[in-house]
Amino acid sequence: MPQDAWSKKRERQYEHIKGGLKKRGRSEDTAEEIAARTVNKERARSGEAKEKSRTSTHDMSSSKRGGQRSHKGSGGRTKEQLYADAKRKGIKGRSKMNKSELARAVGR
């Protein structure tokens, strides 16, 4: 599923991620989707993409997140992500909450 706009480097990155996911037992479709999302996020972070979301550029990079959160279970979302969820849900007192309190408040 490599796209025409991707450079050769991004195509190799896509194939590498997809292959790793398939080795770990993910289905072909799931591996393709995760690999494409990861490559697109990295393109946005490096300024290669025309459009980018705020989380693509301000969230932890995919490679760093994989290294930090691997083998720790879900590892969870960042405090900023939990805070944004709490804000969306209108939870009072969220600015004074720590990460674990925010996680409980938003229901995770």
Image: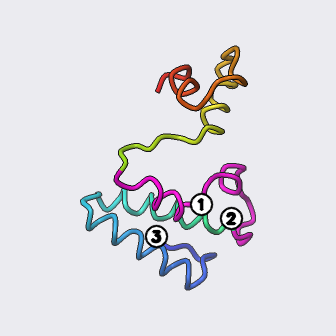
Distance from disc 3 to disc 1, alpha carbons, whole Å, reads: 22 Å
Distance from disc 2 to disc 3, alpha carbons, whole Å, reads: 21 Å
Determine whether label 2 and label 1 are within 8 Å by CB.
yes
For disc 2, the neighbor class at 10 Å (few under 14, some 14 to 19, many from 20) is: many
What residue type is disc 1 on?
Ser
Residue at (47% x, 73% y) in the render = 14
Residue at (71% x, 67% y) in the render = 49
Q: Nearer the viewer, residue 31 or 63?
A: 63
Identify the residue position indicated by label 1 in the image: 61
Distance from disc 2 to disc 1, alpha carbons, whole Å, reads: 8 Å
Magenta-drawn segment: 46-71
For disc 3, the neighbor class at 10 Å (few under 14, some 14 to 19, many from 20) is: few
User: Within the image, what quadrant is residue 89 found in?
Assistant: top right
Tell me the number on the disc at residue 70.
Answer: none
**Element type at mark 2:** helix
* Residue positioned most to the bottom: 8
User: Within the image, what quadrant is residue 102 found in?
Assistant: top right
What residue type is disc 3 on?
Met
Q: Is residue 20 above or below residue 68?
A: below
Q: Position of residue 44 (x, y in %)?
A: 68, 64
Identify the residue position indicated by label 2 in the image: 45
